Image: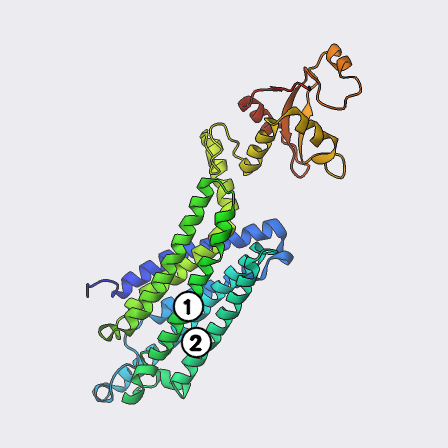
């Protein structure tokens, strides 16, 4: 096997790099939630994501020492008491790493399931989410039972010597690794399958669909990492190697990215829109083309511009009540300007529509915030429209 993923220093560097990215995403997400809904309305999964800090640090610490209790009694007989104590301590951290890894991946599954539950509210996919939640819960419980029952008493996991007849389960976690791999990979696969019908039915722009494909690709990488970590740990040539720990870190970290990216997407969109606006670029992430505004509402802008180009009768219908709010003010209003001549006004008679010679502009008002500069930018991009009433 190639000499890769065996150096503890390489593991530490890679782990801290991936960890720094993951924790930065968590902090950004929680801060965004606080700014948007406040402390009291933060969802349970937002608090749960903070567990990643403690869990990943534990994983990193657990692989710093080499050599647990995976030695035969004959090999232990040649060791000093100090060596035996060191191996016992390392074996404890190996056990902690397995427990923290298990908690990490299943807490992330819980976070994703909460997102799915909100996403599929009222849809037929809601039943699949509930089934997956039950399956994941069962997988966590069964995996824990396998760990506890495979090595009795539990303290034998860090006992030195462990005993030749117990070495496979208490030092190399064979039964546990199999159970963990089966439930982990199958639940991840089902978790990837649930959003696919939603994505296929959606009318998202191609660029947003491409972003979703990237997230799905990262999810597939998480599954492959889970398979590799357990396959490597079960191979006889790698039972005393730390290669599996590299894949643990990769699996946990990329799973963090996958769980956070969908919720960070609006903020990423706004950031890139702001940067694009400052640098004078003319395309946005939503693919609205040249002249799009960079205020995080490009999709809504495009929808309004499409409405403007429709027939005048549709505009009249909307003005009479279809698109107006309860207070008489439309959220996205199409208002005539005062450029019409007196003759034009007279010709309108009692018709409550758009005047023949009237020129109108599109103004978008959100949350009672003045959007004057934005509307001015819109007028510079879009020509004024003349609507003739037939």
Locate residue 334 relative to residue 299 in the image: left or right.
right
Location of residue 318 in the rendering, given as x and y in whole percent from the top left corner: 70, 32
Report the front residue among 28 and 338.
338
Name above or below for residue 293 compared with residue 86: above
Residue drawn at 73 percent across, 38 percent down? 325
Location of residue 230 in the rendering, given as x and y in whole percent from the top left corner: 33, 70
Label 2 crowd bin: few (<14), some (14–19), many (20+), radius 10 Å: many
Q: How many marks?
A: 2
Residue drawn at 42 percent across, 80 percent down? 146
- For the N terminus, the image quarter is bottom left
- For the C terminus, the image quarter is top right
Location of residue 17 in the rendering, given as x and y in whole percent from the top left corner: 36, 56
- Closer to the chain start, of discs 2 and 1, is 2
Label 1 crowd bin: few (<14), some (14–19), many (20+), radius 10 Å: many
Name above or below for residue 104 compared with residue 299: below
Name above or below for residue 100 compared with residue 251: below
Q: CA distance from mark 2 to mark 1?
A: 9 Å
Q: Which mark is residue 184?
A: 1
Residue drawn at 55 percent across, 65 percent down? 130
Asked if residue 56 shows in the view, the reply is: yes
Q: Mark 2 highlights which residue?
A: 143
Location of residue 112 in the rendering, given as x and y in whole percent from the top left corner: 50, 60
Q: Secondary structure at mark 1?
A: helix
Q: Which mark is residue 314?
A: none
Name above or below for residue 37 compared with residue 389: below
Q: Are marks 2 and 1 in contact (CB under 8 Å)?
A: yes
Report the front residue among 24 and 188.
188
Asked if residue 28 shows in the view, the reply is: no
Q: Secondary structure at mark 2?
A: helix
Locate residue 19 relative to residue 266 in the image: left or right.
left
């Amino acid at each position: 096997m190639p000499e890769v993923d065996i150096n503890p220093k390489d593991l530490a560097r890679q782990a801290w790099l991936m960890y720094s990215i993951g924790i930065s995403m968590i902090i950004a997400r929680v801060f965004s939630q606080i700014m948007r809904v406040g402390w009291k309305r933060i969802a349970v999964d937002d608090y749960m994501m903070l567990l990643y800090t403690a869990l990943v640090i534990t994983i990193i610490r657990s692989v710093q020492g080499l050599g647990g209790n995976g030695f035969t009694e004959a090999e232990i007989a040649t060791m000093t008491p100090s060596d035996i104590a060191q191996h016992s301590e390392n074996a404890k951290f190996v056990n902690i790493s397995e427990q923290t890894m298990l908690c990490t991946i299943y807490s992330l599954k819980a976070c994703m399931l909460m997102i799915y539950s909100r996403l599929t509210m009222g849809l037929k996919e809601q039943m699949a989410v509930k089934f997956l939640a039950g399956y994941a819960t069962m997988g966590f419980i069964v995996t824990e039972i396998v760990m506890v029952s495979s090595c009795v008493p539990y303290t034998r996991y860090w006992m030195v010597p462990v005993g030749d007849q117990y070495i496979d389960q208490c030092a190399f976690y064979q039964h546990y690794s199999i159970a963990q791999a089966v439930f982990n990979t199958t639940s991840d696969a089902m978790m990837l399958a649930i959003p696919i019908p939603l994505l296929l039915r959606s009318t998202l722009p191609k660029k947003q669909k491409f972003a979703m494909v990237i997230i799905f690709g990262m999810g597939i990488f998480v599954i492959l990492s889970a398979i590799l970590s357990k396959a490597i740990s079960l191979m006889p040539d790698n039972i005393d190697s730390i290669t599996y720990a590299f894949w643990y870190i990769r699996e946990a970290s990329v799973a963090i990215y996958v769980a956070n990216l969908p919720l960070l997407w609006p903020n990423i969109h706004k950031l890139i829109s702001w940067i694009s606006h400052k640098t004078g670029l003319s395309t946005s992430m939503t693919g609205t083309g040249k002249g799009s505004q960079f205020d995080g509402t490009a999709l809504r802008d495009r929808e309004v511009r499409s409405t403007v180009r429709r027939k005048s009768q549709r505009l009249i219908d909307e003005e009479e009540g279809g698109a107006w709010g309860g207070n008489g003010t439309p959220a996205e209003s199409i208002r005539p300007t005062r450029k019409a001549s007196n003759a034009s006004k007279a010709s309108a008679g009692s018709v409550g529509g758009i005047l023949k010679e009237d020129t109108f502009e599109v103004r978008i008002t959100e949350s009672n915030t003045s959007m004057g500069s934005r509307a001015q930018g819109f007028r510079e991009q879009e020509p004024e429209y003349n609507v003739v009433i037939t």
